[in-house]
Structure formats: C-alpha cells, structure tokens
C-alpha cells in the first residue's frame, strides 16, 4: 500500500532532501545537491520565492519506506499576471513504480484544483533560475549542479499517465578548441566602435556586486518574450546574489556597457562542480567546501549558465564582444570543454549564437503538462 505524507516539519524535509541520495546511490551520472542549500530552498523564512508562491512537499511511502517525493508549486505572479492557471510540480523522484508516481501527482492535482487552476506542468521550480525538465536523452552523461538527473522510466510514467510534452529543451557541448576567434574578432572591433560599447571584466566578487542589480534587470528584459518567463523581483535579486554570484569565479562574469554605463549584455559562466559535488556527498563540512573551492578555481570544464542581450542590441553582434572576452580568459585558464544549460528548442536566436563552434546535443529534456478538469 502507498501512503502520501506532507513533509511539513524540519525532520521530514530533511528526509525529503535526502531521498535521492539513496535512489541514485550507485549511479555515476547523478550529481547530488548540497543538503543545507536544498533545505534553505524549501525554507519559507529564507527563500524569497515564497513571497509570491505557495508550495507543498510530499513524500510517498511503501512498506514504511520512502519511495518517492514531489513538490507542488503555485507561482502567483504567473497565475495572476500572466493568466496561466497552472500548478507547477518539481523535485520529483521515484522508484520504478507507476503507482507511486500516480499517487504523488494526485497531490499536485489536488493542490491545483483547490486553487481553481486548470493544468499541471513540470518538473520545474519556483522561477526561471531553478532547475527544469525531465531528462529524456543523455542518461549516460554526467549531470550538473543546475540540472536534474533522472532514470529513463520517468518519461514512461508521465506518458502512461496521460501527460503531453509541453516544452522541449536541449543541452549542447563543444570542446574549447572548436572556438575560432576569426568568427567574432572582426565583429567585436566593429561593434565596439559603431555603438561605443565597452566590455567589463572583473578580478574580485566585490567588483561584480555593484553591477548585479542592473544585470538582473536586463535578465528580466531580455528573457521576457520566452514562454513561462516570470520576472525576478527585488527581494529575489538579493537572494540570488548571495546564492549564485559568490559561487562563481568573477573572471567568468562578463558585462558589456554603453557610453552612458548602461549594461546592454551580460554572461555568466560557471565552472563545473559536478565531480566535486559527487565527492562531498551533499556535505560542506568538514572538507566539502575546500573541494568546491578547488573546482571553482581550477575546473577545466565550463558551463554557460546565462547570457542576455538588451532587445535593442539583439541583432547587432554584441555577443561577439562577450565571446572575445571569454576566448582570452579561457585560453589563459586552459579550459577544455564548454557546456550549455538547457535551452528551449524553439529559441532559435540563442542556438544561432553557437553555430560556429560546432556544438553537439548531448542531452534532451522536457516538461510535461496535464489538464486538471
């Protein structure tokens, strides 16, 4: 018999966070999260996502053993401002038992119907900076700290339960040796002169911080046209500053500004923490943080996390400036491989940015949708 319990205490939330550690214990491609950070994500007193969202966290039990988990989420900005009558679900993990999946999803449907919503979509988090999608290809590729990994049967469960694919994402990779500067060097010089632009590079996190609010404003503006985009508010900006910016080597953050010191483009690249995270098994202490620090400063694999260009500059070659700056930094650091985070299949503009580097699709993922009525 399957029973569902809401994880509404600190001890149950810890069980919720730790369940995937047992599920993927012997899987060499799964990358564990940092347990303390996951707990903070679900803490309504610490995560500003709860200022405009509600969430419930559920555990599934069979024979008194945890066999699955799921989060049911309502982003009220999305519901009220965009008119999308949607309940999200995320942080979904389960054993290969479709009855467990069904029982967990029933709690999501129930949460949605209680709030007069019309459909459920997931896996996805609170915002566009959270993880997204069920992995459908690339099960033998190492995961990252900013994506979910899952077994192949997840896809089968959703399809058997009547879900339809809503959004499709691809992840690409290419060796740094594929990057030929002749593709962007001339454009870089031309664009800088024509539009009076200047690249901004940084050596310390302290130098980056005064620009971060402007960067998030530009993020909101440059991504506004994408489906399911929900803007980041001022409270969330402060939270993401602490959560992400301190994790990133400041040399991998690039801005482009105009003559009036307005940021017109930005990019954030993260070193790969995957192997370090596997080694520390979710714990920062006593030595976990040292392994992460080593990866931050010495990893030869880079993940292009975010790139944004102001709408007025999106067809003016500004990304050539960003690529030129990364080329210099990556050459100096001896970078070997470049990876890209999940990008919507229909976001042709972003895919065209990378075409000269001969990227290879190594993972695919999607979100699934089901009507509630």
Image (tube, rainbow, N blue to C red):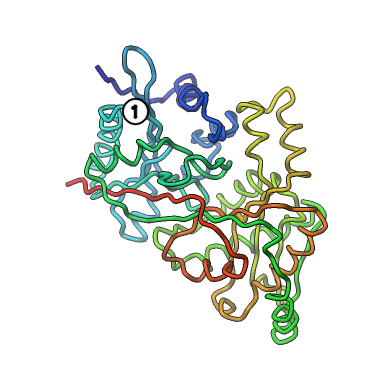
Q: Which residue is label 1 attached to?
A: 96
Q: Position of residue 289 (x, y in %)?
A: 72, 32
At 77% from the left edge and 51% from the top edge, which residue is drawn? 205
Helix, strand or loop for disc 1? loop
At 77% from the left edge and 56% from the top edge, which residue is drawn? 251
Q: Position of residue 290 (x, y in %)?
A: 76, 32
Horizontally, is 27 left or right of 154 in the view? Answer: right
Kindly give the residue lying farthest to the bottom in the view shown.
Answer: 194
User: Which one is nearer the viewer's eye here, 255 or 331?
Assistant: 331
Q: Check the picture and name the quadrant holding the N terminus.
A: top left
Q: Position of residue 273 (x, y in %)?
A: 66, 40
At 44% from the left edge and 51% from the top edge, which residue is drawn? 364
Horizontally, is 295 left or right of 340 in the view? Answer: right
Tell me where residue 309 sits by quadrant. bottom right
Does the image show residue 195? yes
At 75% from the left edge and 64% from the top edge, which residue is drawn? 327
Q: Decide: is 208 above or below 1.
A: below
Q: Decide: is 261 above or below 212.
A: below
Does the image show residue 259? no
Kindly give the residue lying farthest to the left in the view shown.
Answer: 373
Horizontally, is 116 left or right of 81 in the view? Answer: left
Q: Position of residue 262 (x, y in %)?
A: 68, 73
């Amino acid at each position: 018999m399957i029973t569902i319990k809401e994880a509404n205490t600190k001890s149950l939330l810890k069980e919720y966070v730790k369940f995937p550690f047992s599920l993927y214990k012997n899987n060499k491609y799964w990358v564990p999260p940092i347990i303390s950070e996951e707990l903070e994500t679900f803490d309504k007193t610490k995560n500003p996502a709860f200022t405009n969202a509600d969430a419930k966290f559920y555990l599934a039990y069979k024979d008194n053993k945890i066999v699955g988990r799921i989060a049911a989420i309502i982003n009220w900005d999305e519901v009220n401002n965009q008119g999308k009558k949607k309940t999200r679900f995320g942080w979904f993990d389960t054993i290969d038992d479709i009855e467990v999946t069904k029982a967990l999803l029933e709690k999501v449907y129930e949460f949605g119907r209680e709030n007069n919503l019309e459909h459920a979509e997931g896996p996805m988090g609170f915002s566009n900076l959270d993880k997204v999608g069920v992995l459908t290809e690339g099960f033998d590729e190492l995961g990252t700290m900013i994506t979910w990994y899952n077994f192949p049967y997840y896809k089968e469960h959703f399809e058997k339960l009547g879900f339809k694919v809503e959004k499709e994402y691809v992840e690409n990779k290419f060796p740094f040796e594929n990057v030929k500067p002749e593709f962007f060097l001339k454009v870089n010089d031309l664009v800088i002169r024509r539009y009076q632009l200047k690249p901004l590079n940084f050596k310390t996190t302290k130098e980056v911080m005064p620009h971060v609010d402007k960067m998030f404003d530009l993020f909101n503006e440059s991504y506004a046209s994408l489906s399911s985009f929900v803007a980041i508010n001022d409270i969330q900006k402060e939270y993401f500053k602490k959560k992400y910016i301190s994790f990133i080597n400041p040399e991998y953050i690039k801005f482009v500004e105009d003559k009036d010191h307005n940021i017109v483009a930005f990019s954030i690249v993260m070193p790969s923490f995957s192997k370090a995270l596997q080694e520390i098994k979710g714990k920062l202490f006593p030595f976990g943080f040292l392994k992460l620090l080593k990866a931050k400063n010495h990893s030869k694999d880079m993940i292009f996390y975010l790139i944004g260009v102001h709408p007025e500059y999106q067809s003016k070659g500004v990304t050539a400036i960003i690529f030129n700056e990364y080329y210099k930094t990556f050459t100096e650091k001896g970078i070997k491989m470049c990876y890209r985070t999940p990008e919507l299949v229909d976001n042709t503009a972003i895919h065209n940015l990378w075409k000269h580097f001969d990227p290879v699709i190594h993972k695919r993922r999607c979100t699934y949708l089901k009507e509630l009525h």
